Image (spheres, rainbow, N blue to C red):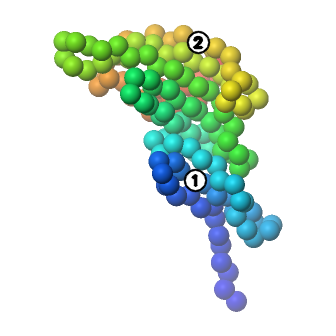
Amino acid sequence: MTLIIISDLSFLEYGQVNVYFFDKTTRHFLSAPVQFSYDYALLDSNKLIYGVNNHSSRDWDIDIFSIKGRSKTYLYKANLFLKDNKNNGEFEITKALLYKCKVGKESDTVLLNDIDIHKQFGDFSLFEFMKDIAHNKVYR
């Protein structure tokens, strides 16, 4: 007899990561995937906390969420503000507004903090910024 172990399935499709969870009791994949942007980072492997970069032309928004429990539970959202630096053609990240997502919902937020950053793009680590938010006990 051959033992086959099947795990969750994830793949990239149209700029989104799709994660299909495998239900061991029914031996089927759950029908609806959890989706998030392809520009993501794992911030906490134990709690399955991820951060995604929703950067568009002039806006820079991030989502921090957990997929522990096989669903996307939003924890935080942040809006980063940019200012062009005419001297060198780059831009500066001036500040961020940090929101806590109430009861895991993306649309139900409360403002937690107005964070001063004032760093040039090349001196700013988005990964470290998101990781600090995810692990900062002050924001819980």
Label 2 element class = strand
What residue is pinned by disc 2? Answer: 113
Label 2 crowding class (10 Å Cα cut-off): few <14, some 14-19, many 20+?
few
Query: Which residue in the rendered view is the most extreme toward the left?
Result: 87
Circle number at residue 18: 1
Identify the residue at image location x=65%, y=53%: 33
Circle number at residue 111: none
Residue 72: name its quadrant.
top right
Residue 74: name its quadrant.
top right
The one nearer the camera, 82 or 133, is 82
Identify the residue at image location x=71%, y=50%: 70
Identify the residue at image location x=68%, y=21%: 109
Which amino acid does the dot numbered 2 rest on? Answer: Asn
Q: Can residue 140 be seen in this view?
A: no
The one nearer the camera, 31 or 19, is 31
Identify the residue at image location x=80%, y=67%: 25
In the image, residue 13 sits, relative to residue 102, either above or below, namely below
Of marks 2 and 1, which one's residue comes earlier in the chain?
A: 1
Mark 2 and mark 1: span between their CA atoms? Answer: 31 Å
Q: Can residue 86 be seen in this view?
A: yes
Which amino acid does the dot numbered 1 rest on? Answer: Asn
Quarter containing the C terminus: top right
